[in-house]
Amino acid sequence: MTLLELTPRVEADDPRTALPVVIIGAGPVGLAAAANLAERGRDFVVVEAGDRVAASIRLWGHTRLFSPWRHVVDPASRRLLEASGWTMPADERRSPTGHELVDAYLEPLAALPQIGPRIRFGTRAIAVTRKGMDRTRTAGRARAPFLLRVRTAEGIVEELTGRAVVDASGTYATPNPLASSGLDPLGLADVTGLVHHALPDVLGTERASFAGKHTVVVGAGHSASNTLIALAEVARTEPATRVTWLIRNASAIRVSSSSDDELADRAALGSRVEQLVHAGRIAVIDSFELSHLESTDVGGVTVVGTRHDEPAHVDADGVVNATGFRPDLSMLREIRVELDDVVEAPRRLAPLIDPNVHSCGTVAPHGFAELRHAEPGFFLAGMKSYGRAPTFLLATGYEQVRSITAWLDGDAPAAAEVRLTLPATGVCSTGLAEGGSCC
């Protein structure tokens, strides 16, 4: 690919020239995109469904990331922050919790005068298209501005136009269904209140939902591991608490416990789960294909499926869905996106992140070239760009938006340059249906 092919073709009379770049999502990657554009003096607007930055992270903020501070702060954001007097947390080797990441980094970043006034909170993106064009129209398409339809917290539907769109809206709000078929299990509506989202605050605000009860955790990735460890801690002080780990595969250990893993907290996570399983504090049911849920006479839930082709069931008081996440693609129906048939990631990126082959640290650094679609100027970034793959690291998302914003600014050499070295890793989550973010 030549530099000419890498350069965005924006003519002087292009109607998009005076329009901002629209960023969907004010999480870490969306704000990093904003910081990179701010450094380049380019106009942008950020639309955020929540009433504050990092709305999804706040939901699992009690959880500690396994990447240390030095890997979870975007370089451009750090430069802007330090110019305002901000200082990096003293121990850059320590991994923050989600709440610490928000309070010490993302909130100050969003408060910067270069970024804060351009964030529209309580504004949910509901559709992306080209102005005056549906998906089927081709003539003049590349010169038509993007049209973003949004709904405000008051229920008002509005439309924004932009020269480009960076969708960094994440995937935490759209978990994979519990059933092994990839669909919601039959009977889910009857037990909705007993099924918990991934990473519940077991040791804090939601403790009462788990203490003294039997909880089944479904999934085999890092989200499941964090919840299993927390439940085992509750069981230590509340003896009636029982923990069952239900997985689809034949092996219970799906996270790194390697001494070669440069992300020490990730390796420790795997080791702790192994120890709890071997000590009998976590019961494991492997090779379980979940099909439906039933309510019990005592107000609990029965998880029903098959094991080794034989009918099987588990009775519990509650279920935690830690089966990973998937992108919400419904708002992209009128634009031309090129997605892999399996992973639902951009087609050129998918082979680099296939979780059957790659762990977090073996994903090659990549940028706009791998993230581009048939719709020039539209990009998926961050966790959403990984589709259903669970191998995402924040540092990777930061490199994505650095490259994308360089390309949008016409800086082809910077867009093509690789500026990321990932930490060496052990084995990360693999099974697509049982993933869980590695971030």
Image (cartoon, rainbow, N blue to C red):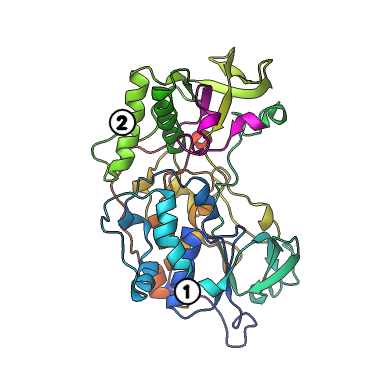
The answer to whether residue 342 shows anywhere in this view is: yes
Residue found 66% across the figure and 20% down from its top: 299
Q: Amino acid at mark 1?
A: Leu
In the rendering, at what x and y percent does residue 15 appear? 65, 82
Examine the structure image and report whether residue 217 is included in the region drawn in magenta.
Answer: yes
In the rendering, at what x and y percent does residue 376 appear? 58, 68
Q: Which residues are magenta?
A: 193-221
Examine the structure image and report whether residue 238 is included in the region drawn in magenta.
Answer: no
* The one of 352 and 214 positioned closer to us in this rendering: 214
How many neighbours does mark 1 have within 10 angstroms: few (below 14), some (14-19), or many (20 or more)?
Answer: many
Q: CA distance from mark 2 to mark 1?
A: 41 Å
In the rendering, at what x and y percent does residue 387 appear? 54, 48
Q: Amino acid at mark 2?
A: Ser
Q: Which mark's residue is nearer the viewer, 2 or 1?
A: 2
In terms of sequence position, does the residue under pointer 2 or pointer 1 come before the other? 1
* Residue lying furthest bottom: 12
Residue identifier under label 1:
37
Above or below 354: residue 241: above
Above or below 41: residue 64: above
Q: Quadrant of residue 421?
A: bottom left
Are the two marked residues, 2 and 1, in contact with CB atoms closer than 8 angstroms?
A: no
In the rendering, at what x and y percent does residue 183 appear? 65, 33
Above or below 18: residue 265: above
Residue found 56% across the figure and 56% down from its top: 169
Q: Is residue 73 left or right of residue 204?
A: left
**SS category of the residue bearing label 2:** helix
